[in-house]
Amino acid sequence: MPPAKKHEPGEKQAASGEGAAVQPGHTADKVPTIRDVALLAGVATSTVSRALSNPDRVNRRTRERIEQVAAQLDYVPSSQARALSSGRTNVVAVLVPDVTNPFYFDIIRGTQNQLKAAGYTQLLVDTEESSEMELDALQKMRKSADGFILAASRLTDAQLAEVSGTQPLVTINRASANAPTVVIDTPSAIIQALEHLASLGHQRVCYVSGPPTSWSNSMRWKVFEEDSRQRGLETNRIGPFVPKTTSGAAAADAAVRTGATACIVFNDLLAIGMLQRLRERGIRVPQDISIVGCDDIFGADFCNPPLTTIASPIEQAGRVAVSMLLSQLNPIYGGVSRKLAVMPTHLTVRASTGPAPVSAPVAQPPQKPQQA
C-alpha cells in the first residue's frame, strides 16, 4: 500500500473528490459569515461592515485585505445586513385598498417600473379597504421599507399627519396637507360628466357613492352637488356601496327607486354590476337610464353596453408618485420636491349614455321565450 502523501507547510488539504480548498473556520457546506471574514482578515466585524458598505471610511490597505478575504470566502452581505449598516433597504412599499380592482393595476405597473429604474424593489400590500390594516402595515414595515406610496388611502387626516411625520410617503388620489400627493382632477371629471348628461336632456341625476372613508368619493359628491345645483338639476345620493360588481344589484335597485334618469357611479366595477342588474330587470341602458362610471378600467369597453366613463393617466400617476418619493429619499434625484401633482381627466363617451327618456325608468317583466 503506497504511503500517504505528506502536505507541505501552507498547502491546503483538498476536499475529498472535489479538489476545492477549505478555509480555516469555514466548511464546504457552511455559508460564510461576516465573522469568518473578520477572523481571517484579522479585524473586527464592525470594520468588515464599514469596508463593504462605506469603503471610504476604512484604510485602503485594510479595505483591500477585507475585500480579498471576502472574495476568497465567496462572502455576500445579506440584504438585512446591508440595511442595518447603511440604514437603507432599497424597498418601497405600495399600499392599495383592493388589489383585485383593475383601477390599481396601472398604478402598480407605473410605480414598479419607475422604482425598478431607480434600483428599488416594490413591496405590494393589499389593505382590503381597511384603514386599520393600512395603519398596522405602516407601523410594522417602518424599518423594512425606505418609503411608502399610499394609493387611495383610507386613513383619516389625523392618521396621515401622524405617519407622514415619521416616515417618507406619498399619497395617490388622497389629498393631504401633511404629505405630497398625486390626485386625479376630480372637479373637472365630474363637471365633464354632468355637462354631458345635461346636454342629453337629463334633469334628474343620481350619484352612486363608494366607501365613506374614500377621499375621492367625498370630493366627487361635493362637486356633483354644487355643479348640479348650478345647472338646476334635481339630485339624489345613494349608498355607500362596496366598489365591486357584486354591489351593483343593490345599487341599481336603489337608483331606480330615486326616479333618476342618469347616474354617475363611484367606479367602473360598481357601474358594470349595475348594468347587469338593470338588464335583468328589463330596464334598458341608455334608453331608460344612462350610466357613467369612473376610472376607465380594462373591460369598461367590453361590457354590455360599453360604459361611458371618466378616464385619467393612472400609470403616469404611479410614476409621478415614485418621483416625488425619491426626491425625499435621495438627493441624487434632485429637483424641488413637489407637494401636489394633478393628473388631467377626460370623459370617454360610449354607449351607456343617451338622451333622457320622457319618463323615469320602469322595470319590465322578464321576456318569455318565444314558442317554436
Image: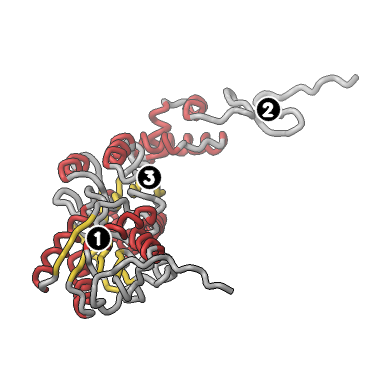
- Toward the viewer: 86 or 344? 344
Which is more N-terminal, label 3 or label 1? 3
Q: Quadrant of residue 90?
A: top left
Spatial CA distance of label 2 from label 1 is 91 Å
Name which residue type carries label 1: Arg
Q: Amino acid at mark 3?
A: Val
The picture quadrant where one finds residue 217 is bottom left
Residue at the spot 21% in from the left edge and 73% down from the top edge:
192
Image vertical order of residue 162 relative to residue 244, above or below: above
Q: Judging from the image, what secondary structure is the residue with disc 2 in?
A: loop
Between 110 and 102, the residue placed more toward the observer is 102
* Residue tagged 3: 125
Q: Which mark is residue 257?
A: 1
* Mark 2: few/some/many CA within 10 Å (<14, 14-19, 20+): few
Residue sitting at the far front: 371
* Residue occupying the point 65% across, 26% down: 10
> Which mark's residue is nearer the viewer, 1 or 3?
1
Q: Quadrant of the C terminus?
A: bottom right
- Please identify the residue farthest to the right as the structure is shown: 1
Which residue is rendered at x = 29% and y = 71% of the image? 290
Q: Which residue is mark 2?
A: 11
Q: Earlier in the sequence, mark 2 or mark 1?
A: 2
Does dot 1 land on a helix, a strand or a loop?
Answer: helix
The secondary element bearing badge 3 is classed as: strand
Residue 312 visible here: no
Separation (CA) of disc 1 from disc 3: 38 Å
Whether 253 is drawn above or below 140: the answer is below
Q: How many other residues sit within 10 Å of disc 1, few (<14), some (14-19) or many (≥20)? A: few
Residue 262 placement (x, y as % from top left) = 25, 69
Q: Residue 229's spot in the image, x, y percent?
A: 10, 68
Identity, as a three-letter code, of the amino acid under mark 2? Glu
Is there a contact, CB below 8 Å, between mark 3 and mark 2?
A: no
